[in-house]
Amino acid sequence: MTRLAFMAVAALAGLSALLAAAPAHPAMTVFADNAQDCYRDAKYGDFHGLGVEDCDAALFGMSTSNRDYAGTLVNRGVVYLWHGRYARAEEDFDAAIAVRPDIGEAYVNRGAAKIALRRYADGIADIDHGLPLGSEEPEKAWYNRGLAHEGLDDETAAYHDYQKAAALKPDWAAPKVELTRFTVHSR
């Protein structure tokens, strides 16, 4: 799908050939013990093609006003990101936020969906809102901010976002690869 390895990753529809090849990296947390299949599909990839069905089954009968329900909506949204169904993913993140507006993962992942839809400024705003609420994998949020800033032609902000992503997870290659494309000049 893209040139980078996935860990619950959605492909980012880019502005250029570079952005078309770069992934958006949603971060997610499972909140429902009875939704392990849905969580696994979101976290590791929907390789068996049943992720949406797994999440739908997990949602069936759950109280629509609790954290588990919202978390499972986030996980299903991530499965949709895996499949490149960004608008559908955004709907699930919106629904999760309506139930529990305090779940950072919903905003961070909605930001990834918006970036994939080339709504870069909106994506950055969602990520900026979600990060202080908490994210299991904030390095992915910073990486996605970098992609969005590049989409907005703000190379300086993109560079700093990729640096932050690399600092948060030094063994992750994706931001380091992006950083190799920049030349920094002293003033």
Image (cartoon, helix red, strand yellow):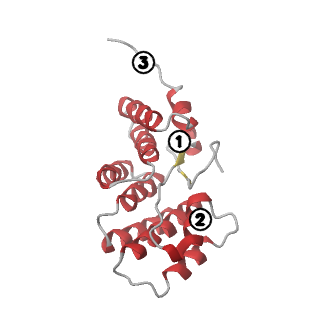
Residue situated furthest front in the rendering = 33
Q: Which residue is mark 1?
A: 19
Q: Residue at the location (45% across, 67% down)?
A: 74
* Mark toward the viewer: 1 or 2: 2
Number of numbered discs visible in the structure rendering:
3
Q: Where residue 27 sits: x, y (%)?
A: 47, 55
Q: Residue type at mark 3?
A: Val
Name the secondary structure under disc 2. helix
Q: Where residue 14 sits: x, y (%)?
A: 52, 46
Q: Which residue is mark 3?
A: 184
Q: Where residue 2 sits: x, y (%)?
A: 64, 46
Q: Residue type at mark 1?
A: Leu
- First in sequence, mark 3 or 1: give its number: 1
Is mark 1 in CB contact (under 8 Å) with mark 2?
no
- First in sequence, mark 1 or 2: give its number: 1
Task: Determine whether, in the image, residue 43 is placed left or right of residue 95.
Answer: right
